[in-house]
Image: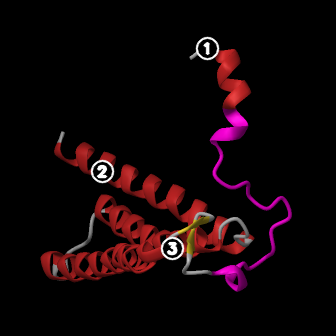
Amino acid sequence: MSIKSFWKNLPYLAIVPTNPNPSLIGIKYFNLDTFIGQTLGWLKWPTLIGMVFGAVAFIVATYFLVRYTRGFFAGRKIPKSWKLILWGVFITAIAEIGEMLGYYEWPNTGLIETNLLLLLPHALGGTLIGLGAYFLYKEIT
């Protein structure tokens, strides 16, 4: 595929264009029957269960990481690397909730769901986990 044909076909690759004037909160557009603008049909329940499972899994993982950390370090100082990883997983759990809301509200996602619950927590959580892993590496080398 040449560059020229790619740019020519680019408009046809989009599923549904996003709303150019998004509202502040898009929860009023939440619809279980559609996912990223596509009708789900019988797949609406498996999709919802999968999205809820992903969000709950991150929340449960955060809970157990905090319990493990408290038990493992038991009064000792928790290293900065491990604190960064814990905060990164916690913030990513928030992003999973925003992901679920944003996909079901598409193309009318609100600014809060898109930025404060989806994009920023994913970027911040990933950065914190990466920094924590880097500091863990530095601790052992």
Q: Quadrant of the N terminus?
A: top right
Tell me whether the residue at label 1 lies in contact with that at label 2, contact meaning CB atoms closer than 8 angstroms.
no
**Magenta stretch prevailing secondary structure:** loop
> Which mark is drawn over residue 100?
3
Residue under label 1, please give it.
Answer: 2
Q: CA distance from mark 1 to mark 3?
A: 36 Å
30 on left or right of 136: right
Residue type highlighted by circle 1: Ser
Task: From the viewer's side, name the closer residue of 123 and 73.
Answer: 123
23 on left or right of 73: right
Closest to the camera, between mark 3 and mark 2, is: 3
Rendered location of residue 5, percent (x, y): 67, 19
The residue under the point 73% across, 26% down is 8
Which label's residue is closer to the chain start, 1 or 3?
1
Q: Which residues are magenta?
A: 10-30
Residue under label 2, please give it.
Answer: 133
